Each structure stands twice: as structure tokens, then as C-alpha cells.
Image: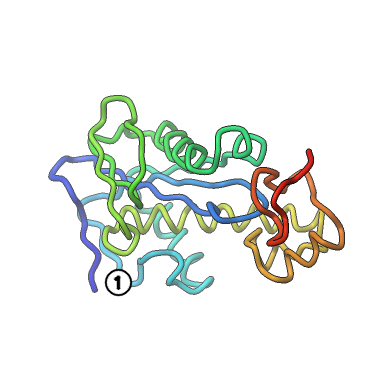
């Protein structure tokens, strides 16, 4: 299925998406991308449906061809402080803020967003598999966050973040049981299935 180019007819439509919302460790990362109206790509889709190799290939293409792109991390302490939904929206706002071209319309993956400045927006469920700019944002957010998790893996290799990227895999949870938590873990999350309250 071909992804649609735009939702609106406005010139600088920006797509935004986040990665890492369901993780136990690391930041939530969002990206914003404005693509030229002539942009076409047959591989680009929701980053979760792409191979690692294709995500990296597309990252280079998007960075080369986008009118503007940006990303932002919101880290663990702030996630614990304002909750993951607010942190995800804040990451999207921060990435939009960094764009070199101000968008005239914003399309957002999912069904939750807060207005950014006075720019009109539209939330779109599964938008990353429907619109090119949201799919592009999902690729930038995912590859950027994965790279960050691979970096902090070197500091705490026992959690194998280079593979699980902080998601709640059996291996990650087994490492939390054995080694405890790190400064990168989200303390407001239920890190273990048996955990109802975390003393912090």
C-alpha cells in the first residue's frame, strides 16, 4: 500500500512520531520531518515494519531529502516526573521546535497531542503506516533512539540494551532482578511483573 503524501493542502506539513514509549529504560525520543511534496519512496513505512538495514538506509535518504528534520530525547527523570504520555508529547513539541522550517500543519501518529503554538494539527491512529512524513519521523526517532541505547549499553552491558533497546523482554527483566536498576531505568514504570510499589 502506497503511503499518502499529505493530509492537508498546506505547503509545509510536518509529520511527528515517537519511539521508546513502552521501554523500561532510556529516553522517549520523537522526531519531526517535513518532506518536499515531490518526495517518493517505495520502501518507507512504519519503522516497526522495516528491517534494521532498511531503517538505516532510509535514515540517510530522509536526512538528505527532507526540507527539515529534527529529533528530541526526553529522559528518565522527566518521564518519571510528568508521565510517559506528557513526555512523549513534549518530545514531539521539542523536535518540532528544532525544525529549520516552521510547519504550517502538523500530523501526529496516535490519538493524543497538545496544540503546538497556534499551528493546526491532526492526530492519526497508525499514521506511521498511512503518511510518508509520519513514517519518516518514525524512522528518525527509532534509529536515533536505538543508537543512544547502543551507547549506554557499553556502560551497563548486563542488560543487553544493544539488543532489547530497553523494552521489557524476559532477558531485560531477569537482569533487573539480578543486578537491580540503573540511573537509566524509569522508576515510575512497573519494572518487574511482581512489582506493585517501588521504594525510591
How many marks on residues? 1
Frontmost residue, 134 versus 169: 169
Please state the horizontal and vertical placement of residue 14, each as a whole percent of the image: 30, 43
Please tell me which residue is depicted at 36% across the width and 39% down the height of the picture: 113
Q: Residue at x 66, y 68 (%)?
A: 169
Q: Nearer the viewer, residue 190 or 132?
A: 190
Residue at the disc numbered 1: 42
Q: Is residue 133 left or right of residue 50?
A: left
In percent of width and height, residue 188 lies at: 65, 43
Provide residue 161's location: percent of width, then percent of height: 71, 61
- Determine the image quadrant of residue 77: top right
Judged from this view, the residue extending furthest toward the left is 9
Describe the colour scheme in one phrase.
Answer: rainbow
| Foreground of the two, 122 or 31 | 122
Q: Secondary structure at mark 1?
A: loop
Front residue of this view, candidates 192 and 26: 192
Q: Residue at x 44, y 46 (%)?
A: 31
**Position of residue 108 in the picture relative to residue 120 (left or right):** right
Q: Could you classify mark 1 by the number of other residues whose Cα lies within 10 Å: few (under 14), some (14-19), or many (20 or more)?
A: few
Residue 171 located left or right of residue 75: right
Query: How far across and down, in percent of the image, does residue 109 sit?
Result: 35, 52
Amino acid at each position: 500500500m502506497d503511503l499518502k503524501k499529505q493530509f492537508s493542502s498546506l505547503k509545509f506539513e510536518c509529520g511527528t512520531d515517537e519511539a521508546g514509549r513502552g521501554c523500561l529504560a532510556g529516553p522517549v525520543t520523537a522526531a519531526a520531518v517535513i518532506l518536499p511534496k515531490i518526495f517518493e519512496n517505495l520502501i518507507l513505512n512504519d519503522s516497526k515494519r522495516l528491517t534494521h538495514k532498511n531503517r538505516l538506509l532510509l535514515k540517510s535518504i530522509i536526512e538528505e531529502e527532507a526540507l527539515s528534520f529534527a529529533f528530541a530525547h526526553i529522559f528518565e527523570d522527566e518521564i518519571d516526573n510528568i508521565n510517559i504520555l506528557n513526555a512523549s508529547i513534549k518530545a514531539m513539541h521539542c523536535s518540532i521546535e528544532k525544525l529549520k522550517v516552521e510547519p504550517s500543519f502538523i500530523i501526529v501518529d496516535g490519538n493524543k497531542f497538545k496544540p503546538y503554538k497556534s499551528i493546526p494539527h491532526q492526530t492519526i491512529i497508525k499514521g506511521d503506516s498511512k503518511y510518508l512524513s509520519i513514517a519518516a519521523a518514525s524512522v528518525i526517532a527509532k534509529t536515533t533512539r536505538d543508537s543512544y541505547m547502543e551507547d549506554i549499553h557499553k556502560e551497563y552491558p548486563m542488560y543487553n540494551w544493544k539488543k532489547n533497546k530497553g523494552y521489557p523482554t524476559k532477558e531485560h527483566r531477569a537482569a533487573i532482578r539480578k543486578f537491580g536498576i540503573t540511573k537509566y531505568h524509569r522508576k515510575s514504570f512497573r519494572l518487574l511483573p511482581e512489582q506493585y510499589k517501588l521504594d525510591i
